[in-house]
Amino acid sequence: MDIQKIRSDFPILQQKIHGHPLVYLDNSATTQKPQQVIDSIIRFYTSVNANVHRSGHFLSERASVSFESTRQKIQSFIHAKQTEEIIFTSGTTESINLVAHSFKNQFIKSDDEIIISEMEHHSNIVPWQQICKQKNARLKIIPFDEHGELIIDAFKELITEKTKLIALTFVSNALGTINPVKELIHIAHEKNIPVLIDGAQAVQHLPVDVQDLDCDFFVFSGHKMYAGTGVGVLYAKQKWLEKMRPYTYGGGMVKSVSFENTTFANHPFKFEAGTSNISGILSLGKAIDYLNNIGINKIQQHEQRLVTYGLDQLSTLDGLTIYAKPKKRCGIISFNLEDIHHYDAMMILDKLGVAVRSGKHCAEPVMNHYNIKGTIRVSFAMYNTTEEIDRLLVGLQKVQEMHR
C-alpha cells in the first residue's frame, strides 16, 4: 500500500487544526471521504439527478442503472448469493430496526427470548429492548470476560426453545474485539435460531463473506466505510425476505394500490419505500470501488500493524489503562489516563490537532462492566500512519504534564 498516495486522495487530511496537521483517529465514528467519493456525489447532482425506478426518461434510466449497479457491487463485496438479498437503508440503525419490527410483528410473542451481547452498540440494544417490552418477551445478555471476549459457554446456556433471534456485533465499537461470529452462528443454527450480525465496525476492515458466515442478516453503514452519510445496507437471506413484511410503507414498494388493498413489490423493493438517498448510495458504490482497488486484505494487514504499534507505544506510558486484551482486535484501542478525565484529555489532544473520541461510545453497558464513565478511543483507518500514533503519544504526554 502506498499510504502517501492514499492520503493524497483525502482532501480533509491536508488541513491544519489549531495550527497543527490533522491527525484523525476517530474513524469508528465516521471515516473521511476520498476525492473519488466526493466527486461521485457532485457528479450525481450536476449531471444525473433524477429519481430511480420511477420514470423512463434518460436521466432516470441512467440513475436507475447506477443505483442497481451499486447493489451488485455490494453483493459481490460481501459475497451475498444474489442482489435481491441487498436492501438499501439509511444506515445500520435503520437496518436493525427493519428486522426488529418485522420480527416483533410476525415472530415474537409473550415469553419469547432474544439474545444480544454485553458489548453491543446502543443501536443493537435499544430496538430489541423496546420490542421485548412491547411483546412481554425477555432480553438475555451474553457476558464478556476480563479479556473483553464473549463467554461462549454462557452463550450456549442462554439458548432455550423460546429463543427467537440472536443479534451480535462482529467487532466491538468500544473495545475492538473481533467476535467469533461464525462459531456463534453455527451454535445458534444447531437450534434453528436466526442470527443478525452488526458489521458496522467490520466490513471496512476485514474480508466479509456472508455465505461463509451463514448469517441470516448482516447490517452496516456507508459513512463508516468511506462513503457518504445517511446510507446503509441490510443483507438478509432470501427465505427471510420472503416471510418478512415491510417496515415502512409508501411509493416505490408496491405493485398495485387501491383503496381496498395493496399488493407489495417483490424484494428488495418492498423494503425500500420512498425516495432513497440516491447520491449516498452511489457514493457507497464508489467507496467499494476504492476499497477493491486497494484490496481489503492489504488494508487489514496495514491496520493490524497500526493496532500492534499503537498498543506497544501506549503501553510505555505510566498511568495508562487499556481496556480489553482480546486475542483478535480490529482497529480500536480504548484507554484512560490515571486521574485525568477522558473528556479533558480529548480536548487537549484536539488543541494539538489530534482527533479522538471520548465518552461512552454508544456502548454504556461496556462502561458499566468496567465501572467507568467513559474512555478515550482511538480508531484507525487505512490512511493512518505510525507517525500519527507518535503524535498521539506526544499529545498524551503533554496531557499528563499539564495535570501534574
Image (tube, rainbow, N blue to C red):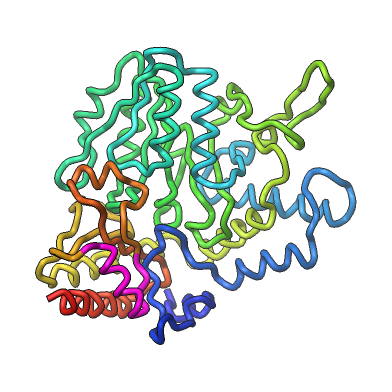
Q: What residue is shown at x 56% (from left), y 38% (from top)?
A: 81
Q: What residue is shown at x 79% (from left), y 50% (from top)?
A: 51
Q: Is residue 95 left or right of residue 270?
A: left
Residue 298 visible, this orientation: no
Q: Quadrant of the N terminus?
A: bottom left
Q: Quadrant of the C terminus?
A: bottom left
Asked whether 1 or 154 is in front, the reply is: 154
Q: What residue is shown at x 79% (from left), y 61% (from top)?
A: 48
Residue 235, placed above or below residue 390: above
Q: Is residue 74 left or right of residue 195?
A: right
The rendered magenta stretch, by its main secondary structure, is classed as: helix
Residue at the left extreme of this rendering: 318
Count of numbered tags: 0
Asked whether 241 or 2 is in front, the reply is: 241
Q: What residue is shown at x 20% (from left), y 50% (from top)?
A: 372
Residue 217: x %, y % from top left: 48, 35
Residue 298, placed above or below residue 118: below
Q: Which residues are magenta?
A: 341-356
Residue at the right extreme of this rendering: 57
Residue 234: x %, y % from top left: 54, 40
Residue 270: x %, y % from top left: 68, 32
Question: Is 347 colored magenta in this rendering?
Answer: yes
Which corner quadrant of the image does residue 238 belong to? top right
Question: Is 275 colored magenta in this rendering?
Answer: no
Residue 246 visible, this orientation: yes
Q: Is residue 359 left or right of residue 258?
A: left
